[in-house]
Every structure is written in C-alpha cells, then in structure tokens.
Image (cartoon, rainbow, N blue to C red):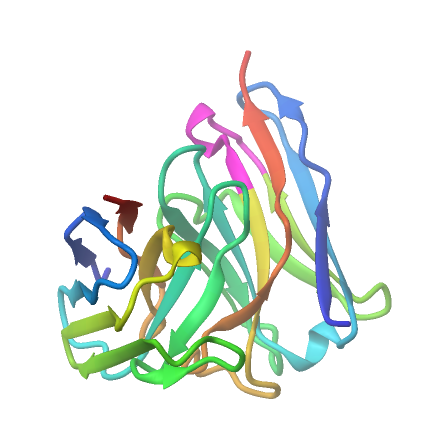
C-alpha cells in the first residue's frame, strides 16, 4: 500500500528550529517529486515546498523561503522539512504529498497521496 | 506569484442538486489545475488533475473543465458524502498556490 506518515510536530518557541519527517512506504521517494503543504487550523491550504525527483531542485513558498529547507533521504525512503527561525504564523498542520506521476517534475498530474499530517505549534 | 480565487466561498445545496464551483487564476496556468476535496480532520483528496481529468476511483458525477485562467468543478448530483471543502490548485509555476476553498454545506 502506498502511504505517507508524517512525524515530528511539537510545540516550539518562536525563533526555534524543528525538523518534521515523512516516511514513505509502497514507493520510492526518489522516483517522485514530493511536496509539503500546510494548513492553519480552520483555514485553507498553503503550498510550502517541493523537491523534484531527478535533480533534487527545490522550490519554496514566499512565506518560508530562506527559513525552510526540504530534503530527502533515499535510504530511509523519507522526506524532511527543516524549519528555522520559526514564527507564530508557522503554526499549522503540515502534510507531505507525492506527485501522481513517476519520473515527472511537471506538476501536471496533481498530488495523489497525502499523509495524515503533523501539528507544529509555535508559541511562547 | 499566481493568485487563485474561488467563488463562491460558501455554498448551501441539497442532495441531488447540481453544483458548480469556479476558480480563476491571476494569469494563465494552461491546464495545470487540480481540484481537491477535504473533509474535517482529513487530508485533501485529489479529484481532478490537468483541469479535466478524473482521478481514478473518483465518482463520475465529478467533472472539471477550463483552460488558461478560468476553471470549473461540477458535481452533477450531490450525494451526502460530497459535503466538504473544495480547493483548486495551480502547478503551472512555483510558488504553487491554492485557492481559498469553497465550503459546501447541506441546505
């Protein structure tokens, strides 16, 4: 079964750093472009970042650029999001998701598998 | 950045109704639009990709259309399990963006 399971969400003070993880099963993370998407409770979805399957090019939303880093460990078959200089407005539910199409970085085919999410709370 | 707007933001409808949601991009996104359904406490679910392609296992009462800047998602005959929030999403250029969502409620 293709599955994504996020972990690592905690309560952390502003200015702190945190890494959340996304463990994949049923497929290889290095064969797919992968994403992080977040959602403030009760609000809409915000695309955060993606890493392409073939060349590890990374892209970020404006609100996290320069503070967050997406990465992948092919041996552990996992995706990560390193979050630095955290702000209260980073408080959200963080989902990882995979592109539908293997060996593709176009984005044309949508994100077909999502994890259940992990909660990050930034508060003093 | 490409902004995605949706209308209406909220909609009340009855089982059996036909409903249409609209999504507009601030500049052309070709057909790089997908639609997601999200129920409370759950992860989003892919319904439509490439503007009009139905995702596998999604009921055929869902359909998408559009190209360029204007897109629609239609549910031909609402079922009780369809009451949820619907988001459009552009993957034409980074940063990717979602619309604000349309909350579909039972009348």
Q: Quick check: A119 left or right of B25?
A: right
Residue A16 magenta-highlighted: no
Q: How many marks?
A: 0
Using the image as rendered, state which of residue B40 and residue B97 is in the foreground: B40
Residue drawn at (54%, 46%) of the image = A68
Q: Quick check: B22 left or right of A98?
A: left
Residue drawn at (14%, 74%) of the image = B69
The quarter of the picture where residue B86 lies is bottom left
Single out the residue that lies furthest toward the right. A75
The quarter of the picture where residue B67 lies is bottom left
A90 is higher (above) or lower (below) than A45: above
The quarter of the picture where residue A84 lies is top right
Quadrant of image for the N terminus of chain A: bottom right
Image position, residue A17 (x, y; %): 64, 32
A84 is higher (above) or lower (below) than B56: above
Quadrant of image for the C terminus of chain A: top right
Image position, residue B21 (x, y; %): 20, 63
Q: Quick check: B48 left or right of A67?
A: left
A8 is higher (above) or lower (below) than B75: above
Residue drawn at (68%, 44%) of the image = A20
Q: Quick check: B64 left or right of A80?
A: left
Using the image as rendered, state which of residue B85 and residue A90 is in the foreground: B85
Residue drawn at (48%, 42%) of the image = B40
Region in magenta: A84-93
Single out the residue that lies furthest toward the front. B16
Using the image as rendered, state which of residue A61 and residue A6 is in the foreground: A6
């Amino acid at each position: 079964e293709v599955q994504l399971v996020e972990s690592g969400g905690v309560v952390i003070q502003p200015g702190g750093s945190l890494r959340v993880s996304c463990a994949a099963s049923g497929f290889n993370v290095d064969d797919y472009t992968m994403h992080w998407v977040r959602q403030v409770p009760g609000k809409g979805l915000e695309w955060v970042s993606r890493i392409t399957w073939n060349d590890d090019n990374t892209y970020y939303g404006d609100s996290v650029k320069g503070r967050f880093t997406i990465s992948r460990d092919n041996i552990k078959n996992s995706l990560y999001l390193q979050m630095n200089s955290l702000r209260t407005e980073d408080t959200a539910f963080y989902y990882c998701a995979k592109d539908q199409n293997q060996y593709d970085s176009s984005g044309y085919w949508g994100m077909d598998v999502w994890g259940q999410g992990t909660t990050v709370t930034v508060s003093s | 950045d490409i902004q995605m707007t949706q209308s209406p933001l909220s909609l009340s409808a009855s089982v059996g109704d036909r409903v249409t949601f609209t999504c507009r991009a601030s500049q052309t996104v070709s057909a790089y639009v997908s639609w997601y359904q999200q129920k409370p406490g759950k992860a989003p679910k892919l319904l439509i990709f490439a503007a009009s392609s139905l995702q596998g296992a999604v009921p055929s009462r869902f359909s998408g259309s559009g190209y360029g800047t204007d897109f629609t998602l239609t549910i031909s005959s609402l079922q009780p399990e369809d009451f949820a929030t619907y988001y459009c999403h552009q993957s034409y250029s980074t940063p990717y963006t979602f619309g604000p969502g349309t909350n579909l409620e039972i009348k």
